[in-house]
Amino acid sequence: TVVKRPMDLGTVSSQLEGGHYSSVRQLAADVDLVWKNAMTYNIDGSWIYQSASKLKAFADAKFSPLLSASGGGGAEGEVTE
């Protein structure tokens, strides 16, 4: 499986510290992409897939009120509660 748009938490952190995100929605989209990529690249049921799935659910729950407060809805239509 080919990951079309690589993203990792180190890049997210660097971009956040560098002020590259202009909205919560952009940040949430990149964080969501980290988990989606991990789940795409690794087989269903593997510990990495399962961990990414749990982390995605956790991140979605944390971002949901921030996105609602900012009127952002979901990140690429995915981060919703």
Image (tube, rainbow, N blue to C red):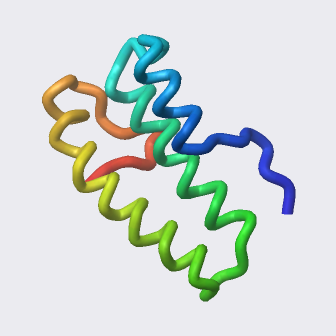
Q: Quadrant of residue 63?
A: top left
Q: x, y (%) of residue 13?
A: 46, 32
| Closer-to-camera residue (10/47) | 10
> Image check: 43 left or right of 71?
right
Question: Of 41 and 69, which appears nearest the observer?
Answer: 41
Question: For the point 38% across and 48% down, which residue is it?
Answer: 79
- Image x and y of residue 61, in percent: 24, 55
Residue found farthest to the right: 2
Residue 5 in the figure: left or right of residue 36: right
Relative to the observer, which residue lies in front, 64 or 50? 50
Q: Nearer the viewer, residue 4 or 73?
A: 4
The answer to whether residue 23 is left or right of residue 39 is: left
Residue at 58% from the left image edge and 33% from the top image edge: 11
Q: Is residue 34 shown above or below 57?
A: above
Residue 59 on image: x %, y % = 33, 53
- Residue at 64 percent of width and 41 percent of height: 7
Look at the picture and state if 51 lies above or below 41.
below
Q: Quadrant of the N terminus?
A: bottom right
Left or right position of 38 against 17? right
Q: Quadrant location of the C terminus? A: bottom left
Q: How many marks?
A: 0
Residue at image coords 65%, 82%:
44
Residue 40 place in picture, x, y as percent: 69, 64
